[in-house]
Amino acid sequence: MNEADIILKLEAVSKSFNTSRGQLQILDQVSCVVKKGENVAIIGPSGSGKSTLLSLIGLLDTPTSGTIEVAGVEIGSLSEREQAAFRNKYIGFIFQSFELISPFTARENIAAPLEIGEREVSEGDLSNLLENLGLTERQNALPQTLSGGEKQRVAIGRALVNQPALILADEPTGSLDRVTGEKVLSVLLEAVEHAHATLIIITHDESIAERMDRVFELRDKTLHERK
Amino acid sequence: MSGSRLILLYSTRIIRREWRRFVLPFLSLAITSVVLMLILLLTGASTNLLVEQARELLGGDVVLESASPVAGRDFIMKAGITPTIVSEQVSFSGTLESNTATAPFTVQVVDTAFPLYGKIVLRDGTFSGIADGELLLDNAGLKRLEVERGDTVSFGAVSLVVSDVVVSEPTSLFGGFQFLPKAFMNQSSFAQSGIDPRLLRASYTYAAAVPTLSSVEIESLRVLEETTPAIAVNIAGIDQRGLQFGLKTVSDFLVIAVLITAVLAAVNVYASVLYLVTVERKSLAVLLALGLTKTKLVYILGTALGYVVLLVNLVGTGLGVFIFGRVQDFVSNKYLIQLPTPDLLLYATVTSSLIILITAMSFVPAIRMSLSLNPKQILVGGDSPLSKQSSFWSVVLITFSTLVPLFVLAAFLFKSITKGILIIGVITLVYVIVAALYSFVISRMYSIRAHAGFYLRTIISQKHADGLFGVVSFSSLFVALIALCILTLLQVSLERFLVNDLGETVPSTYVLDIQPSQKDQITTAFPELELFSNIRARIVSIDGVMIQKEIEAGNTDVSGELGREFNLTARRELLPSESITNGEWSSGARGEISVDGNFAKQANISLGSTVVFFIQGFEVSGRVTSLRSTDSRSGLPFFYFVMSPEDIGQFPSVYFGYAYYDLEQQAVLGRFLAETMPNVSLIETQALGPLLLQIVSTLLILVLVVTIPPLFIATLLVAMLVIASYATRRREGARFRALGLSRRESFVQYLLETVSVALVAAILAYGVGILATALVSANFLKLDSIVLLDIELVVGLGLVIFFILGIAVYLYITDTMPLRELLSYE
């Protein structure tokens, strides 16, 4: 495989936590490679470490051992400041509980990554994105007045606005009903395809996993790819 | 978008959209600011007032006293002080004579600048100095000489006309009470009398007006005083003598009240900031996931807080000044006391700086600790972010940084870095010990919680999960309650001191010149009269040193003061105002002498010294068996020497006495004396009463007014903590309800948690408060005793518990958010 085609590379990544009852191993020697443009699902039972793995990939947490490369950069070597800048440039997050910034309107939430990255906010691009997400009417609404589906569409817009190479979605439809979930997923997949980004999605839902290019199962603290 | 623009944009956006979250901290900080400003203004005004009164009582800012003429100007110039105006006076005991009577007087010879401060109130006219040939007498003097205004009185070779009657004069209470009536004349009249002042037991006074005395100048004066023992230096507001003691005590109390307020303010600001950081951090932590650096997040939150602090300072200082104006009006109308207006700009700057400093000092460590977790932990475990960090050292670090501004304030108020360190050190120590103890107890209880019932287990678990916020909340509540206890106990003790010790111990009635033949008759008729013999004597020798001879020979090692006549008394019992500091007093056994400790030092008399007196042609000797300290504020008779009745009882003696009579009893005594003992003089100290009462009531009002703001802020802090704790419990309560607990049960659980903690804090605070009050009282206020059990305080603490209960019930009743929303509410 050509190195230039690889967006994510995990090599023997382990993660453990110190608890009052000793060390708790969550991930053990996890390795995998994801190519640019691939849509990948990670499934597994609750507590198997899916969210932890996503946090490690997204630089929200650091592994106990092993290396993680995103877009050819070994992220363990980055300083905290560099990690923040890297996250802003290369990674888009979508959380199950949306995690919108409560004092920001829908439009401001979406624009936030651009502003944080000190990039020009193109009002035209922003309006297009809002329109594509069906949020034009609700762009000035505060998060607490949005419905669950709207919130998650805002979260998707926020994850995509920077045109990151890697989108990380942690059960993006987990807080939504089936119909709304379907709609949100379609919007997400369409947007990811349009942006030529790579999607890593955590889900419990087999029907969502089936729509991905590759599926990994997190079992016995490590990843197993379904053939 | 540039970094600074981003910070400004986001912080403004947060304030605009999330202003509701800032309301509680804003209100808390604003009230803190108002109270701080108000108490600083009140203290500043009160201190100015006290300084004015101290100046009036003393007769100047710096007053030099000596038994010989004082080269005052040279003396204070040596200390680097240039007075704006000076007044020189001589006072002595002398005899005045009218056409019908002769009487001993305390004569005060004054210059044109007298009095430097305060005013002399005359019965008929207005005082504008004393002209040549004029004499002012007080009421007692008028009576003793049987004269009226316009009559002539002679003193030595000069005849003087009584020009008016002195009703009150500012220095009348300085140095205790005069037994003799008082007369004032000018220097020219005194010169014409032809009396050589060296033949009198004169006291020379040099009073200087120096409106601002620096600590260096005060120190220089003290050094000069040490090297010039013949001159006593009195500094207004610093030296404690007579009623000055009361003024100094109240000044010290004001400083303590300000410090307690500042401690409460700091804790309050800290609790508010921590609350804000806790609620805002979670909602903003997602910005970290979007690539914002922690530093920028700190700046954004800090800037948002900065806007709040700016508004707080504007509102706080403005409202503080407004309320101070109303308090001034109220005190002026109700008590006829004019509180001076201090420098408003200075106090506004001090208040604003303190609020900014305390906020910054509490914000930085709080947010740094709060953000020390990685973004995932903040997002996932954001509800109790600080619990894992609640180590002893975290509390110590935060407490220290919060108390730094307090140290600056304490050092400023006490004008001493050492005192500042000491005071703040003690406060810090108490705070840290309480925090550490609380952490330890909660941690221990948590480890054995399995044995407790559901409610108790839940309370313990929640307290444990509260982590640092819980520790700070408890410690803050504890500090607020301790402050409440200390202030109340001090205030009650001080009030008792002012009313009882300072006012009530001064006898209302003195009788002078009772002859031995009249003693039995008067004590039979008026058994309440406490009589003292008064025998005049000169010291012949002390430990073999022939005093009079040495003075005549010009020996400077022997104080000239020892050359004069002394009043001796024979007594078996000590007065309530006296206490033995060294040696023993065995009920006036033959040959024993008790000497005033301060005088003994001046006269080189020590325990075991032999003193020989010359009394009415006979030499009487005795051995000093005890040294006494005398409470000069008691207004009770004072003698340098107390001897055995067996040694001097056989000498013919005059007696004087005192009693606590009301006006009616005084009238009876007056009629009795007029009819049967016309030679005996009656002095009614009510003549001094109005001034004394005015001063005491002023002090009481000041103490009361200054105590109210800290009590208010303590209550506010308690309310703030209850509301903050409710905010953190709200969602937990909803989760319990989702699991099957009724709304009522969930509330009872919260109530039990709050009240039980408050109760423990209140009981502990009362105990520690008593200890702290005793320490403060002994080391700073020098009160003889403190009130240990104050029913009002106990009731007050009970009310605090009810207040907490009330707030909790109010929050419960007004919280109508449906369960579903509560569960999803951020």
Image (cartoon, coloured by chain):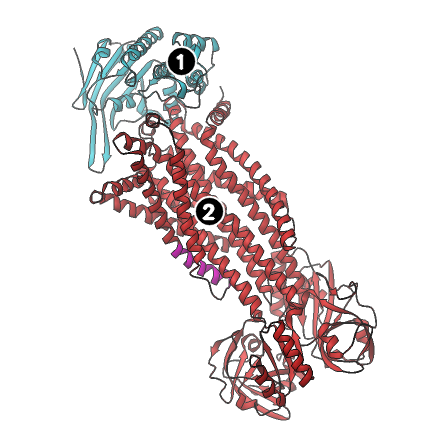
Chain colours: A cyan, B red
Q: Could you classify mark 2 by the number of other residues whose Cα lies within 10 Å: few (under 14), some (14-19), or many (20 or more)?
A: many
Tell me: residue B297, above or below residue B40: above
Q: Could you say where residue A139 lies in the image, as x and y percent from the top left?
A: 44, 14
Which element is circle 2 on? helix
The foreground one among B350 and A199 is B350
Tell me: residue B634, above or below residue B652: above
The Cα atoms of the two marked residues, 2 and 1, are separated by: 50 Å
In this picture, which residue range is highlighted in magenta? B766-783
Q: Which mark is residue B655?
A: none
- Are discs 2 and 1 located on one and the same chain? no
Q: Could you say where residue A166 lies in the image, as x and y percent from the top left?
A: 32, 14
Per the image, the residue denoted by label 1 is A161
Q: Could you say where residue B304 lies in the image, as x and y percent from the top left?
A: 49, 30
Per the image, the residue denoted by label 2 is B714
Q: Amino acid at mark 2?
A: Ala
Identify which residue is drawn at 48% across, 28% down. Answer: B19
Q: Is residue A61 found left or right of B686 in the rendered image?
A: left
Q: Is residue B247 found left or right of B814 in the rendered image?
A: right
| Disc 1: host chain | A
